[in-house]
Image: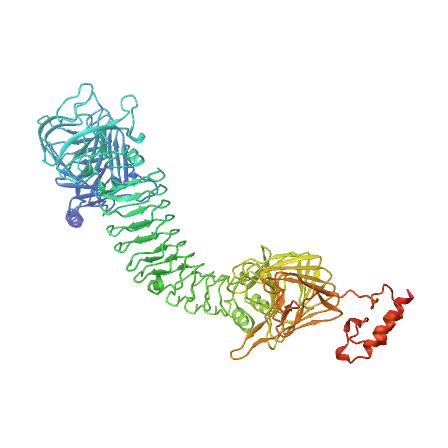
Amino acid sequence: MKKLLSSLLCTLLCALCSTVSAATNYGIKVGGVSVTSDNAANVTGSNIKENVMGRPYYVVYEASTKTLRMYNVKIDRTGSNNRAILNESCDGLTIVFEDACWLKAADASPLRFNANTTIKCLQGTESDTTFVYGVDEDAITVANGATLTIDGACLHVEATNSSAIIGNSSARTEKLYIKNSIFYIAAHYYQVEGAIYNMALLSMSGSSGSTRAFPRNDKLNDHNPGGAPSINNITSIVISDDMKIAHYKEQTISAEFIRDDEFRTGMEWGVNFEKALIPVDAAHFPDANFRSYLLETPYIVKSHLFASDIPKGNFMDIENKEIASLKGIEYFTNLLYLYCENNQLTTLDLSANTMLLKLRCDNNNLTSLDLSKNTSLNYLSASNNQLTTLNVKNCTLLEQLECDNNKLSSLDVSGKEKMTSLECQGNALTSINLSGCTALKSLVCYSNKLKTIDVSSAGNSLTSLTAYENELTSLDVTANTKLTSLDCSGNKLTALNLSQNKQLETLKCYDNRLTALNLLYTVNLTFISCYSNQITGDAMTEFVSGLPPQTSTKVFYIVNHDSPAEGNEITAEQVATAKNRGWLPCHYYNNDWYDTKECLLYDIWIKSRRVTNHGTQASGTTYDHATKTLTLTNANIQGKGAGTGSITDRGYGIYCEEPGVTIDVKGTCTVAGDVDNQALVLYGTNTNPSKATITGNGTLNLKSNIEAIYDSGTNDTLTIGGNVTVEAEGSIYGYSRRVPGRERVYYNSLLIKDKATVKAKSSDCGIYSWKELLLKDRHEIIAPEGAYWDAENHYVSYADGTTVGDEWITIAVEELTYDLNNDGKISTADIQIIINEMKKAQASQNMAYDLNGDGKISTADIQVIINEMKK
């Protein structure tokens, strides 16, 4: 019974075991690890490491296609039979190096193939060159009559003390095919029998960059005394008609592969070609610095370029080489990457380089760039040139474009569905065509002349828009709902709709003409800079009431008192509202930012800077708003600006719209206008006239090439009094205008009183266009002699009625004399003159005898003479 149970148990176990099949061994070893069905998806081992640090690496075997794929792998082994790759029995194996790999063995061939094997690279370019390095044994051994095919690969095969590639059988049955590959090979120049040795067949074929293979010799079987023959002991050599062997150029190999400085200090490179050689001379490459660069590259042999041998994926970095011409670049038809920035290029023709992917040509002197033939281009940087035209119309794969700091007036990037970044700042752009740029994430277009810009095509892709310092009068970002950063400062915007921009985090819209700003929907906003707009009163209340609440205090910049264009006002109550919502309003004054208590604007501008509750920002000036007194103390005010435009753009010395202002002059002060602008403008209206007064004990010098003082209001009176001296180099002008069908209308009056002295000089007339000139307190026109106020023509005239021009007009208090009859003494005879004048009708009295200045001639004037007689 026990035997029966035992037998049944054994049968059951065998049945169970038969259901679990053993792992399949594919007859391949990588780094000493057998490739089986268990590990084919990820072949790992202690000898399989990353080649380039920080990048992924892997070994994968696909049994269905017999393909071994290796990516960024490094295998470095020592010891007998310890190889990097061994193909024991997998007939038809294909090895694909998907990125550059590094395979080395010190005491055995790094690669041994006992069965037919093909080696490929994913790109077949120098970017994924795989290095095979044998120290004391052959680098690649082909055995058992196998065939090794190198097809579409880029290999560097090198051996120190043996052959690079060898057939292992004494019967010489192995074969080697090299097709369409870039193939570098090196072996010691002696002690070995050939770089490629002991093969039944060596076949080379293909075009476009095939096979750099042989050291020293330009004849395949010629043994070079003192060094290894290129190819030796080969039964049959077949080279296709389009493949020829050229001369060789010595090229120092990289230190990474120098292991024995005594024997190996360099290597010879062979190059194949299918077209005529291109001499590297002035006729083909006019620029000497470009030629110098080319002569140091592996594409040049005996000062000739082998065009067909330039590999696909060629990278050319020629920045900072003082190159003025890239004529000859057209021979590099496989060029993918060209970096030629920081040179002296004035032209750049890349029409023949149709495979180009990336171009950097910044910091040259290019005036135009036509890339219409470069349809594969995905990156262009052409900043800091002199470009007036840029043609990227056919570059539909363009992802990134940088053309900033040029002279472009228009830019068409329409249809660039893959473009994510555009930088075109610092040009003279008046238009940008962005239609079809549906993937655009970042647009930088500041410092141009754009009046409009349509970013609707970018839709939800656009996250950052930097468009400051343009001429935008409107901006629609309602379609850009994923926008997180917006800078539209320094434009002419009067409105900004942010109702759809809920993800906005940073907003800069300062220096515009906004009269309102609603941020109620921008719930993620954490930074605001909106100074130098026109937000006041109820609009400011609505603005601060709509600020998105913050859990921690955020600063926002609301007023810049150093900006002539500042028009924002914020009261103490509005500041409190902002703070209650977690925002700290700040204002700028005298080159620094301060916490704001309130910022109020007064209607006085000094040198285009507006007077505020924080001060005047002009040396020697103060303003007391409570008394409406502008005090000038030894002030020197020079207006700066153009002759037209707004108050802040023009070059007025002082511009005053504040009614009832008193200008108190202390010391010697100068106020001047710039470029056809007045030194002092007093502006008022019918209902709110200026009513300004100039007073004090100092001297006020006013200078302008037009009106020194311009009272531009209506129904106004300008008063000059106190002990002030006003000297106007330029006219003192009262506003007047011609009404259609009527004579000119004069609106304002000039009153001079107390002990003030007024002097004015102009090419037309120093004082004119006043409704009336009111002289009080014995003021008279004392110069020029004989001049008088012509009430009919509203200007100061000579006695003959002509206008006083180009002479100083002086109005001052008449110097009184009590010797009325000019007999040299004061006596009763002078009293009699007053009595005689009193007898006349008042209208015909000579008011020069009003000695006490009470506006009439009476016994009070006689008393003045009596008092003088008592002295």
Regarding residue 649, the answer to whether it shows in the image is yes
638 relative to 192 in the view: left or right? right
Q: Residue at x 32, y 59 (%)?
A: 439
Pinpoint residue 66: horizontal percent, then vertical percent. Answer: 16, 44
> Which image quarter: residue 361?
top left
In this view, the residue in front, 363 or 56, is: 363
Residue 237, above or below 336:
above
Q: Quadrant of the C terminus?
A: bottom right
Colour scheme of the rendered structure: rainbow
In this view, the residue in front, 512 or 797, is: 797
Pinpoint residue 784: horizontal percent, then vertical percent. Answer: 68, 63
669 relative to 512 in the view: left or right? right
| Residue at the top extreme of this rendering | 226
In this view, the residue in front, 493 or 30, is: 493
Pinpoint residue 609: horizontal percent, then vertical percent. Answer: 58, 61
In this view, the residue in front, 538 or 133, is: 538
676 relative to 847 in the view: left or right? left
Pinpoint residue 323: horizontal percent, then vertical percent. Answer: 33, 38
Figure disc tally: 0
Residue 303, above or below 473:
above
Regarding residue 107, the answer to whether it shows in the image is no
